[in-house]
Image (cartoon, rainbow, N blue to C red):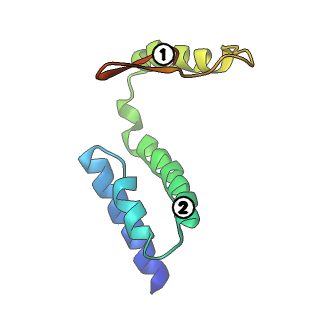
């Protein structure tokens, strides 16, 4: 009964998260916290996201715009894996500037 209830909660949180348009973690993490400790919930959430993304590709894959994927996806992956960062350079520097924050390097 425990396992069935847990999988039902995971399924409902994923459906609601997909339909609502924001992460299923908003629903899954607090509810899974009733069954498991924090570290197990984090691991289960990552597994939920992997299977969720695979299911979304199966269900909605025919609606992917290949041109948009090539224009945005490929350069971002190339930039991410080909960028050389020296050991002394930080990935993100934050300087307070009055009421706003300026991000130098992302």
| Residue 26 sits in quarter | bottom left
Q: Nearer the viewer, residue 3 or 97?
A: 97
Among numbered discs 1 and 2, the one appearing first in the sequence: 2
Image coords of residue 24 (percent x, y)? 37, 53
| On screen, residue 63 above or below 82 | below
Query: Where residue 44 is drawn, which disc sits there?
Result: 2
Dot 2: few (<14), some (14–19), or many (≥20) neighbours within 10 Å? some
Q: Residue at x 52, y 15 (%)?
A: 105
- Residue 16 occupies quadrant: bottom left
State the residue in front, 106 or 50. Answer: 106
Crowd class of label 1 (few under 14; some 14 to 19; many from 20; radius 10 Å)? few
Q: Position of residue 85 (x, y in %)?
A: 69, 16
Q: What residue sits 31% from the left and 45% below the top? A: 22
When asked about the image quadrant of residue 29, the answer is: bottom left
Residue 75 image point, x, y percent: 54, 13
Calculate the distance from the C-alpha at mark 1 to the C-alpha at mark 2: 32 Å
Q: Is residue 56 above or below residue 68?
A: below
Q: Quadrant of the N terminus?
A: bottom left
- In the orientation shown, which residue stands out farthest toward the front? 98
SS type, badge 2? helix
Marks 1/2 in contact by CB < 8 Å: the verdict is no
Residue at numbered disc 1: 70
Identity of the residue furthest to the right in this view: 87
Residue lying at 26% horizontally and 49% vertically, measured from the top left: 19
Q: Secondary structure at mark 1?
A: helix
For residue 13, above or below residue 62: below
């Amino acid at each position: 009964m425990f396992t069935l209830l847990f999988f039902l909660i995971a399924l409902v949180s994923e459906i609601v998260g997909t339909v609502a348009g924001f992460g299923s973690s908003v629903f899954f993490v607090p509810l899974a916290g009733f069954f498991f400790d924090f570290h197990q919930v984090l691991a289960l959430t990552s597994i939920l996201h992997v299977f969720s993304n695979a299911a979304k590709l199966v269900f909605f894959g025919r609606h992917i715009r290949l041109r948009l994927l090539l224009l945005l996806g490929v350069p971002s992956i190339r930039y991410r894996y080909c960028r050389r960062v020296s050991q002394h350079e930080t990935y993100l520097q934050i300087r307070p500037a009055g009421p706003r924050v300026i991000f130098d390097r992302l």
